Image (cartoon, rainbow, N blue to C red):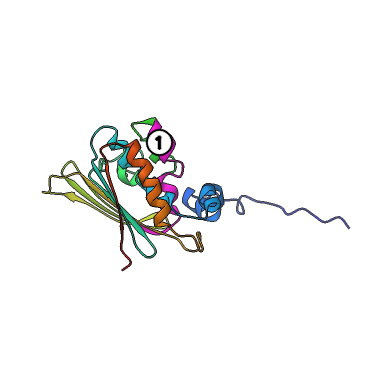
Amino acid sequence: MKEEKPKYTSESIHSLESRDHVRMRPQMYFKKVYTEKSLDRLPLETACHAFDEVMDNNCNYLKITLYSDYFSIEYDAGMSLKPIYGNDNKTHAETIMTTIGACHNQKKHLAVGDEFCELGMMTINAASEWCKLITYSNGEKGEFLFKEGKTEARTICGSDEKKNYTKITVKPDATIFPDLKINPITLQEKIDVLRKKFVGLDIQLHMNTN
């Protein structure tokens, strides 16, 4: 008796959100991470916006801090908090963090996008257990909390602090990257190479095991 092929209906076919696809097929997006068996590239690609601003002399320092199971980056340039109309009124900052391709497409310098946006912020965010973004830009302060790439909370308000600043904290999801860690020695080697590329950018690597 010939076995019947399963029948698919409109109810059984659904469109996955980009972040869901990243979480279901991480090997497609993080090929080099799995090949290198290291998360070293995550902090550096999270800093892609900073490198873009360095090219315009708008960013002078970058601080990378490694914790026991997460990392943060801080730099002296802000992400725009202006809304992008037609995109659910999301700000530029939130769009970069949650929309696939937005990180690369909003780069002012294509060379930076090509080299440091291979993953893109949305992909890194989607593969995190949680991610936090704090940014100051043009007299405004934005705070965002993401869980598995989805916006959980956001606060945007005026700020009396006349500064441009961004801090992104990422906790890679251990279920997606089992047994993979950031190696501070090899990460420092990559930072040393970047210092030669971005002359004048003060890049610091700190360890915090708390």
The residue sitting at the right extreme is 1
Q: Residue at x 40, y 31 (%)?
A: 111
Of helix, strand and loop, which one carries label 1? helix
Q: Which corner quadrant holds the N terminus? A: bottom right
Q: Pinpoint residue 66: horizontal percent, then vertical percent.
A: 34, 59
Number of callouts = 1
For badge 1, the amino acid type reads: Gly
Residue under circle 1?
113
Q: Is residue 182 magenta?
A: no
Magenta region: which residues? Answer: 111-132
The residue sitting at the left extreme is 160
Q: Is residue 115 magenta?
A: yes
Tell me which corner region of the image, top left, top right, bottom left or bottom right, holds residue 80.
Answer: top left
Q: Which corner quadrant holds the C terminus? A: bottom left
User: Which of the two residues, 185 or 9, is positioned nearer the viewer here?
Assistant: 185
User: Which of the two residues, 4 or 181, is positioned nearer the viewer here?
Assistant: 181
| 177 sits left or right of 136 in the view | right
Q: Is residue 34 above or below residue 78?
A: below
Q: Residue at x 40, y 46 (%)?
A: 190
Q: Is residue 4 above or below residue 50?
A: below
| 5 sits left or right of 34 in the view | right
Q: Residue at x 67, y 51 (%)?
A: 8
Q: Is residue 6 above or below residue 115?
A: below
User: Which of the two residues, 98 or 125, is positioned nearer the viewer here?
Assistant: 125
Q: Pinpoint residue 144: horizontal percent, then vertical percent.
A: 29, 54
| 149 sits left or right of 60 in the view | right
Q: Is residue 98 visible?
A: no
Q: Pinpoint residue 71: horizontal percent, then vertical percent.
A: 35, 58
Q: Residue at x 25, y 38 (%)?
A: 200
Q: Pinpoint residue 161: horizontal percent, then vertical percent.
A: 12, 48
